[in-house]
Image (cartoon, rainbow, N blue to C red):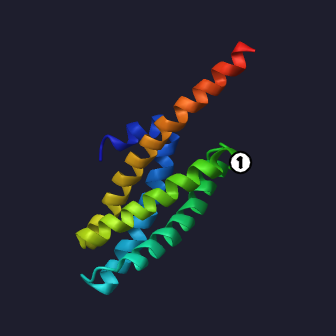
Amino acid sequence: MAAFPGIWQRSLCAVTGAIAGGITGLVFGLLQGALGRVPLCAPDVLGAGLLLGGFSWLVALVVVGLWLHHGLAATAAPALITSLLTALLTVGVSNRVLIAPLSVPLGLLIGTLVGMALCRLCEGRWLRREEARHVR
């Protein structure tokens, strides 16, 4: 956990993923605690992942887009992809593990890794676009 703040300072996408993973892990962990050790079926996991991903996307937009002043238009699409993917993976893994207190750390880890991976994909495309602008 000590390495996370260093990663989050360098990667805005990892921050978005961590926000989505933390929120998803918290809500799904509370749901698991209320249900007991009963795994959900695949359609329920998908529905919970999409619902929590959409909610965490809205929270990430407020935090990253508004509070950190990166703009809603610039962060909306990448944050949506990161939030949905993180939420689906967090719900899926937490549903397999069935230990409610581990849902938040799992969500933070999954969100950070997903954010870092997606950031590297987008960064390469962005650099190519920037280089093309400077050539003209």
Look at 37% across and 79% down and name the residue there.
Answer: 31
Closest to the observer, 87 or 4: 87
Residue placed under numbered mark 1 in the picture: 73
Q: Quadrant of the C terminus?
A: top right
* Whether residue 116 is situated above or below residue 127 in the rendered picture: below
Question: How many C-alpha atoms fall within 10 Å of the one at disc 1: few (<14), some, or many (≥20)?
Answer: few
In the image, what residue type sits under mark 1? Ala
Q: Where is residue 10 drawn, in percent x and y?
A: 46, 34
| SS under mark 1 | helix
Q: Where is residue 87 drawn, in percent x and y?
A: 44, 62
* Whether residue 56 is situated above or below residue 125 in the rendered picture: below
Look at 36% across and 43% down and name the residue there.
Answer: 4
The quarter of the displayed image where residue 102 is located: bottom left
Look at 39% across and 36% down and name the residue there.
Answer: 6
Residue at the right extreme of this rendering: 136
Residue at the bottom extreme of this rendering: 35
